[in-house]
Amino acid sequence: MSYLRANSYLKEKLGSKYLLYLILFLYIIIVYITGLFPETIVDSAKYASVSREMLANGDLIHLKIHGDPYMQKPPLVFWLGAAFFKLFGISIVVFKIPTLLLAILGIYSTYRLAVLIFNENTGRLAALLYSANEAIFLLANDVHTDLIMSSILIFGTWQLAEYLDKRKILNFILGFVGVGLAMISKGFMVFAVTGFSVLGYLLIKKDYRSIFSIKLLWGLLILAVILFPALKGLYDQFGIEGLKFYFWSNNIDRIKGEYSHYKHDYLFSFHT
């Protein structure tokens, strides 16, 4: 009798909708895991080389590729690669594992953020749509900084939203740590994305007082601590040009079409 009741309870809880979610997430997980094994190419292979060189010379802030100074990306992706190489040995799979773990963090953060702002069902749908995005598959399988940045940024934004909702100091710290790590994974424009996101959230809540809260300025100190090693490495190797690249060329000049041979693309950061 107890077995029948338990079986009935499971059927009630795991209705067709929940079973569909389970099946879809299972397929998604399989795709992500199988993506660990193909070889890395072009940018991803270059990032793996910088990580391997970082492990070999033990220098975490002065990035090198084949002995030459490197400034095209901030250091987080290389720190992750070097750390996992140190723990598990040098291989393609090991290099991809941090990005896969961060992808899972981004999916979970998407779910929690949507639940906080809307409801449980919206959270599940948001996580499903985000995790099934073809671009996310590709960026997890062939490591790029975009997925690392977006995953940590979603986590930071979720934590800041939790802080603004519950006023817990841990959420405040984790939120700005997430934003800071996102800034040293892709670039300075992450700060603007976060600012507009938080501003929009406060406007929706009609929490106008928090918009001008002095307490949020403490978060800038957290960002400064996280940014320091990345900026020091750029300045030591490239001087002012290194700092200009991080704060301007890598973001604004890409939009203006001056950093590369591509035409002007004023929506570069939007669709990227």
Image (cartoon, rainbow, N blue to C red):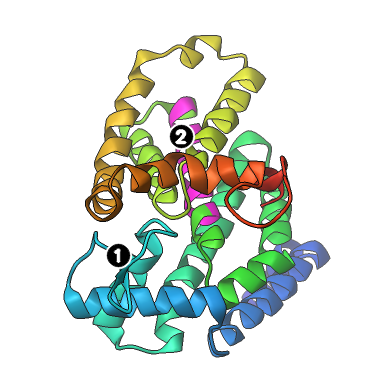
Q: Earlier in the sequence, mark 1 or mark 2?
A: 1
Could you say whether the residue bearing mark 2 is in a helix, strand or loop?
helix
Q: Amino acid at mark 1?
A: Leu
**For the point 42% across and 46% down, which residue is it?**
246
- Give 175 or 135, whichever is nearer the viewer: 135
Q: Residue 8: tell me if it is visible.
A: no
Image coordinates for residue 132, horizontal then vertical, percent: 72, 66
Q: Residue furthest left?
A: 58
The residue to which callout 2 is attached is 160
For residue 55, side relative to residue 11 (left or right):
left
Where on the picture, by quarter, is residue 106? bottom right
53 magenta-colored: no
Q: Residue 209: tell me if it is visible.
A: yes
- Magenta region: which residues? 150-164
Q: Amino acid at mark 2?
A: Leu
The residue to which callout 1 is attached is 63
